[in-house]
Image (spheres, grey):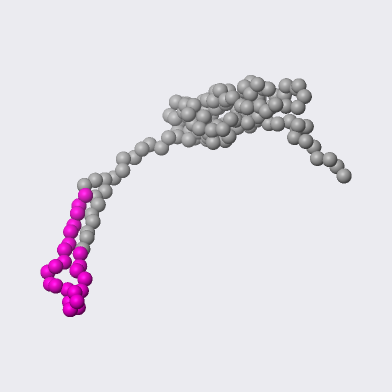
């Protein structure tokens, strides 16, 4: 029967502190859409391969694929600013990790002014039947309210 390997025998991968959602927030905060790409209405995804040193700093970032127009350079700039957490490794080896990160470039949607919509509400009040079974004539109300937008 084989013994189970303990966790201390495995090399642990670096991770971005806060997880994928924190990484997305960092990318969206730091992303500056390249002017050439904005002029040409270019959108796309840049795939960046980066090397992470034993300290957690990104030592190298290379764009593997992308739409062009300066998007690759911007993606490499953002990835180079990232700082990863590297768990303690077994032994005293200083390991360089490689990670592939995708950064999506989407043109900002122009804010279209909403068309003003007028709202109209109608309320009707009908009295309920009295004990005699017949409602009194002329006791109903009707309101129409027009709200400006």
Quadrant location of the N terminus? top right
Image position of 31 (left or right of 109)? right
Residue 133 lies within the magenta run: yes
Residue 139 in the image, given as x and y percentages of width and height:
14, 68
Q: In this view, does 90 lie to the left or right of 122?
A: right
> Of 104 and 71, which appears nearest the observer?
104
Q: Which of 3 and 110 is in front in this view?
A: 3
Assign the magenta stretch its main secondary structure.
loop
Residue at 26% x, 45% y is 116
Q: Give x and y (percent) for residue 81.
A: 56, 23
- Region of the chain picked out in magenta, as a range: 125-147
The residue positioned 18% from the left and 57% from the top of the image is 144
**Residue 30 higher or lower than 134, as above or below:** above
Name the residue nearer the viewer: 27 or 143: 143
Q: In which quarter of the image is residue 120?
A: bottom left
State the image quarter where residue 109 is shown: top left
Determine the residue located farthest toward the front in the rendered image: 131
What residue occupies the far left of the structure in this picture?
Answer: 138
Residue at the far right: name it.
1
Q: Is residue 37 left or right of residue 47?
A: left
């Amino acid at each position: 029967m084989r013994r189970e390997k303990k966790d201390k025998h495995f090399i642990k991968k670096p991770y971005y502190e806060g997880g994928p959602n924190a990484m997305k927030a960092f990318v969206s905060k730091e992303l500056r859409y390249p002017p050439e790409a904005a002029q040409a209405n270019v959108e796309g995804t840049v795939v960046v391969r980066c090397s992470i040193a034993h300290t957690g700093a990104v030592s190298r970032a290379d764009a593997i694929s992308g739409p062009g127009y300066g998007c690759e350079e911007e993606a490499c700039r953002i990835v180079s600013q990232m700082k990863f957490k590297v768990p303690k490794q077994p032994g005293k080896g200083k390991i360089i990790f490689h990670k592939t990160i995708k950064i999506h470039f989407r043109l900002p949607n122009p804010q279209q002014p909403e068309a003003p919509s007028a709202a109209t509400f109608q309320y009707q009040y009908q009295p309920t039947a009295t004990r005699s079974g017949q409602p009194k004539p002329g006791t109903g109300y009707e309101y129409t309210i027009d709200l400006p937008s």
